[in-house]
Image (cartoon, rainbow, N blue to C red):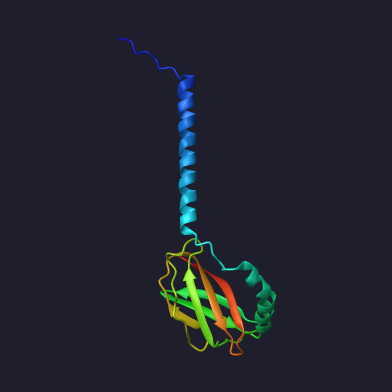
Amino acid sequence: MAKREREFTGKHALMLFGGAFAVIIGVNIALAVSAVKTFPGLEVKNSYVASQEFDKRRNAQEALGWSVYASSAGDQVKLEITDADGNPVEVAKLTATLGRATHVQDDQQPEFAFDGQAYVAPADLGPGNWNIRMVARAKNGTEFTQRVILHVKG
C-alpha cells in the first residue's frame, strides 16, 4: 500500500500561527500578573507632602559630606560610612533593609554594629545584586537616607 504524502494546507498554517500567538499571549499575561502581584509599588503614602520637604532634606544630607560603600564577605555585610576627609563616621542611629530590587520576600533587617571602621552585620546573602536601603541619623540629628547597591559574587 502506497503512503499518501500529507499536504500542508492553509488550515495547518492558521493552526500553527494561532497556537504560536496563543503561547506568546499566555506567557505575557502570566508574567504581567506575576509582576503586579510581587511588586509592592508604594514608596511614600503621599507624594505631594514628601516633595515639599525634599530639597531641604537633600541639602542637609549633602552638607554632611558622607559617602557609603557596601561589601560582603561570607555571611557578613559591611557598610562603610566616611566623611568628606575619608574618616569613618559613627552615627547616632542606623537602620537598614537588605533585599533584592525585584521582590520583598528576601528582605532582612540586619543589626549593624560599629567596629571602629565600619558597620558590620550577619546576613543571609545569595549571589547577585542586593539593595541596602539605609537610614542613618547623624549626631546633630540630620537624617541621611541612601540606597546602596551590593554585588555578591556566586
Residue 51's spot in the image, x, y percent? 66, 70
Count of labels shown?
0
Above or below: residue 31 compared with residue 134: above
Q: Residue at x 56, y 71 (%)?
A: 147
Residue toward you, 6 or 94 = 94
Question: Residue at horizontal 46%, vertical 21%?
Answer: 11
Q: Residue furthest top?
A: 1
Q: Which image quarter holds the C terminus?
A: bottom left
Position of 88 relative to 107 (above/below): below
- Can you say which quadrant of the picture contains the N terminus? top left
Query: Going 52% across and 85% down the picture, which residue do you hit?
Result: 93
Tell which residue pokes out farthest to the left in this image: 1
Question: Can you say whether 39 is above or below 148 in the image?
Answer: above
Relative vertical location of residue 33 with respect to residue 44 in this rendering, above or below: above
Measured as percent of width and height from the top left, residue 97 is found at 48, 73
Q: Is residue 85 left or right of residue 135?
A: right
How far across and how far down the image is residue 60, in percent? 67, 81
| In front of the other: 142 or 79 | 142
- Residue 146: where, in percent of width, then height? 58, 74
Toward which corner of the image does residue 82 lie, by quadrant? bottom right
Q: Camera-side residue: 11 or 7?
A: 11
- 119 vs 144, left or right, is left
